[in-house]
Image (spheres, rainbow, N blue to C red):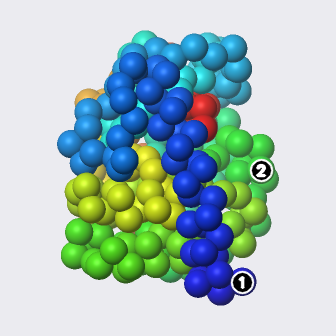
């Protein structure tokens, strides 16, 4: 299936997906539906109601199952207030070695991760066999970070859609999952026009962060752990990157920090209903 065919299919299904997402958000917050997500929308921490439990946290963490909440409208930067752990998210994949290290770390420890994939990076195909069982079980979630990491605010509407659809194709064909509705705009650059274009192909939820490991560049393992000590706190969405070797050395210490603080890890699907 070429990208034009996929784009038509996504456009056809996105309307229903966006409507369902918006209605769920309005039921939780009492707000009127918006025609497009707002670039300045603040994350909501208003609890919804659901009896569907998530998977339990990792074996080394406090077992604290939580109920899924309705997905809020607009940009999400944090988990709902009271969430007893973090969403550890990982971007890019410039280093195949770091992607492998993250996958093995997850398999060994049970840590739940959300990867924001750039399909252009060979790392994701290099380690697809290692990742597939984790993705299939739901321990690892895949989300859309565009095909090759452009600043979306500098692209045309068609360019924005093409970036997301091409990456959607890659994720679906390689791992057999639908990454919608979450996308992370490269560099965090997005506005109402970007959000509207993304929503037209089903990517209705811009997902940012509330804490960073600051490892998009080449920093030391000690520095990464220092940032984790600052940001590994309940209800935080923390951004890391699979780009440089300092991350590999930090992973065991990051796992220990989670255990010491009794913080669970959650994927986005663990926390939010679609």
Query: Residue 74 at x, y = what percent?
Result: 35, 41
The residue beneath circle 1 is 1
Q: Nearer the viewer, mark 2 or mark 1?
A: 1
Left/right of residue 274 with respect to residue 228 in the rendered view: right
- Asked whether the viewer can see residue 95, the reply is no
Q: Position of residue 165 (x, y in %)?
A: 53, 72
Task: Identify which residue is drawn at 60% across, 32% down.
Answer: 273
Earlier-in-chain disc, 2 versus 1: 1
Circles 2 and 1 in contact, beta carbons < 8 Å: no
Separation (CA) of disc 2 from disc 1 = 22 Å
Secondary structure of residue under mark 1: loop
Residue identifier under label 2? 136
Is label 2 in a helix, a strand or a loop? helix
**Residue at 72% over, 64% down:** 175
Q: Residues within 10 Å of mark 1 (few under 14, many from 20)?
A: few
150 on left or right of 117: left
Residue 5 vertical position relative to residue 248 in the rendered view, above or below: below
In terms of depth relative to the viewer, which is nearer, 59 or 69?
A: 69
Please tell me in which quadrant of the rendered image residue 1 appears.
bottom right
Q: Is residue 116 above or below residue 168?
A: above
- The residue depicted at 35 percent of the width and 58 percent of the height is 196
Which quadrant, please, contains the C terminus? top right
Tell which of 100 and 50 is nearer to you.
Answer: 50
Percent of width and height locating residue 114: 54, 47
**Residue 11 in sight here:** yes
State the image quarter where residue 137 is shown. top right
110 in relation to 104, above or below:
above
């Amino acid at each position: 299936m070429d990208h034009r065919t996929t784009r038509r299919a996504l456009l056809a299904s996105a309307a229903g997906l966006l409507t369902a997402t918006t209605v769920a958000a309005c039921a939780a917050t009492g707000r009127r539906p918006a025609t497009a997500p707002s670039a300045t929308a603040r994350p909501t921490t208003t609890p919804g109601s659901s009896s569907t439990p998530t998977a339990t946290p990792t074996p080394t963490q406090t077992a604290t199952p939580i109920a899924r909440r309705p997905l809020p409208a607009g940009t999400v930067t944090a988990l709902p207030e009271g969430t007893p752990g973090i969403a550890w998210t990982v971007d890019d994949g410039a280093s195949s070695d770091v992607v492998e290290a993250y996958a093995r770390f997850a398999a060994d420890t049970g840590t739940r991760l959300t990867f924001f994939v750039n399909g252009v990076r060979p790392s994701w195909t290099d380690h697809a066999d290692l990742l597939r069982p984790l993705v299939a079980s739901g321990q690892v979630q895949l989300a859309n970070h565009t095909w090759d990491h452009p600043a979306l605010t500098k692209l045309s509407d068609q360019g924005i859609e093409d970036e997301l659809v091409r990456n959607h194709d890659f994720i679906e064909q390689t791992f057999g999952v639908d990454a919608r509705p979450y996308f992370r705009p490269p560099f965090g650059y997005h506005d109402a026009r970007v959000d509207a274009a993304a929503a037209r192909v089903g990517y209705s939820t811009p997902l940012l962060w509330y804490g960073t490991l600051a490892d998009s560049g080449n920093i030391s393992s000690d520095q990464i752990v220092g940032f984790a000590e600052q940001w590994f706190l309940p209800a935080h969405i923390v951004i890391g990157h699979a780009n440089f070797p300092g991350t590999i050395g930090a992973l065991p210490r990051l796992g220990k920090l989670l255990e010491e603080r009794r913080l669970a890890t959650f994927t986005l699907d663990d926390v939010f209903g679609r």
